[in-house]
Image (cartoon, coloured by chain):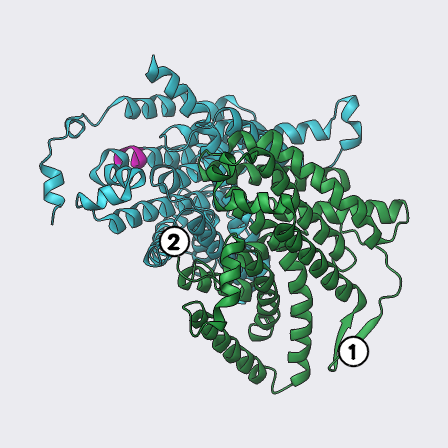
Chain colours: A cyan, B green
Amino acid sequence: MSETLVQTVPSPMRKRRFFDGNMIAVVVLVVLAFPLPLLLEQGQEAIAIRVLIFAMLGMSWNIMSGFGGMFSFGHAAYFGIGGYTSSILLVNLGISPWIGMVAGMGLAAGYGVIVGWLCFRYKLRGTYFALATFAFAEMLRIIVQSAEVLNASIGWNVPLIQGSSWWLMQFPAGSPNYFWLGLGLMAACLVVTIVFMRSKAGRFTIAIREDETAASSLGVPVLQYKLTAIALSGAIGALAGVFYTQYYLFIDPELGFGAYRSIEAILIPVVGGIGTIWGPIVGSVLLAPLNDITAAILRNPPPFLEFLQGRTGLDVMLYAVLIILVILFLPKGVFGTIKEKVTKR
Amino acid sequence: MAVTDATAEAAPARGLPPALKPILISIAIAAVVFFLAYLRTGGSGLILTQALVTGLLAGGVYSLVALGLTLIFGVLHIINFATGAFVTLGMYVTYVLSSNLGWNPYLTIVVSVPLLLLLGAVIQRFIINRAMGESHANTLLLTLGIGLLIENSLLLFFSGNPQSVRTEQDRVFNVFGAVATQSRVIAFFGAMLLAVALFIMLQRTPIGTAIRAVAANPTGARLVGINTKRIYVITFALGIACAGAAGTLVSPIVSITPVAGEVFNITAFVIVVLGGLGKVLGALFGGLIVGLAEQFGGILFPDQSNLLGVFIVFVLILFLRPQGLFSSGS
């Protein structure tokens, strides 16, 4: 109805060309990253691929909670739905993970819309909304963990094939194709995020985050755009889950739906910069290698850390310290702080 | 918070206040659940009595943890995601003292409570106080980071192998045909004792009055000369100490791992939402309800984790009465 009102306001942004600064940056990023698997060793390539998975997961959270302002504590649900849908379709029916990916994204978006609708229907916001997303994700985990049809706590192994196949999204270990596939998917997510944030829906999403009452009194259909943001976020989360499963060839309830996955989804944009397009990318580049660095330290500890040899836990401790420091000293995240400094000048 | 508690308590005496309706509805739901559980067990009264006894005993400890969480929320408006980690820390303090120095596990509470009080005060003073007044997401993430740090430090130093605290032969009590082990009974009464002590402290002492004043109106409290930052430190320390004490009390019952406190984290959220965020009495009753929901959930969905029942209660409460069962109005 009054949507037309909003549209008649001339928007200078609307006339912008498709290839603005952000888009050019995506192209540059892809071109620069493309030769990486040929330069890196196999172990380093694994880290690079984890960066890509983290980036997709972080972007997913960032759309719903960073741009949309709806704090999600249950992003594991989307990730798990994606990974489970594609692997179940592949194992039971031999359906390509590409189709499984589309199905998983649809299911995750649908799940997000239903949970989101319920939460908004009952006017949950802020802390209560976060707790509700957490509760739903945990319920999914519990149900999956004990449902025999879903292989309960055993999880799913992606059946191995000989050689490599783009159709089955599977390549021999160490093949650069995994990286290129991930890079392509991540770039696609990035482009979708940029286009979404430029679109009317994206602009409305930000308006709703800033002041829901004002947006709604200007005729923005608040519920519709909130659910759109959640659906997009859920779809990208599921995409990350599918790629994760196809790369590690395995998923179980804890890996897919565990609370730790939800925490990861939050940490990445928080460290990088909440509500910025590049924040999740920066966050994933900073966070993904930590795991391997600590693993290397613990495998071969310096003399004063000798007693820690072979222990686990140091990686997450570093995550935790990092998150505390970032919140205290860089509350806008690494990229967010840099961006602010640059634009102020 | 105490003000609303008082009205909620006194309300039933004054005819039919709005707070009574949801309570009646919950009683009706409880009756239906009880009946379904009765059918499910094939009419075995014993299983139901056992579920009641176990549920209530476990619920007492949940109450204590939730009390700490709700206290912190009521005063600081922070959801403390590290609650479970502090419960775990309490367990490990008890484990170290009793297995290395041979202390009686329950005696270790004289160490675990002061230690966690101190730790809580330090965390609030040097970390969280710096971020007070910023967005809720930030303080929530800080507690999340602190929780991860504690859990994984424990993992690093004690490894993930489950540990247990040695106790002498666990005596068994007979309650209407159901069994209750001595350690569970001690945990229940210990938790209740501490909860009541804390409640009295909040109501009757100057420091408790100051805490309630800050909860009700921080600006007003500052105007009458209360140092709110100090009250934040004291409150956070008290809330953490509740979690630590609960950890000590349950250490003879549970298998101690770095993530053993997680279940308390989850149940504490549920209880606090159930009882109304920031409501002390709500937390006490909510704990018992969640303890029962866990047991009856186990009967109704025998193939699922006990927590499923808890989450179902949680979601229902979130949707139907997010302000909590025990408060009128929103």
Q: Residue at x 66, y 39 (%)?
A: B120
* Viewer-nearest residue: A206 or B174: B174
Answer with left or right where residue B113 lies relative to residue B308: right
**To which chain does the residue with label 1 belong?**
B
Residue count near mark 2 (Cα–Cα under 10 Å), binned few <14, some 14–19, many ≥20: some
Q: Quadrant of residue A308?
A: top right
- Residue B329 horizontal/vertical position (percent): 39, 60
Question: Which SS does the magenta portion mostly show?
Answer: helix
Label 2: which secondary element? loop
Q: How many marks?
A: 2
Magenta residues? Answer: A191-195
Q: Position of residue A26 (x, y in %)?
A: 33, 26
Callout 1 amino acid: Asn
Q: Is residue A48 visible?
A: yes
Both marks 1 and 2 on one chain? no
Q: Secondary structure at mark 1?
A: strand
- Say above or below: B39 vs B187: below
Closest to the observer, A156 or A212: A212
Chain under callout 2: A
Percent coordinates x, y for residue A253 in the rendering? 55, 54
Residue, disc 2: A124
Q: Is residue A335 left or right of residue B50?
A: left
**What label sits on residue A216 in the rendered view?**
none
Name the residue: 42% across, 70% down.
Answer: B17
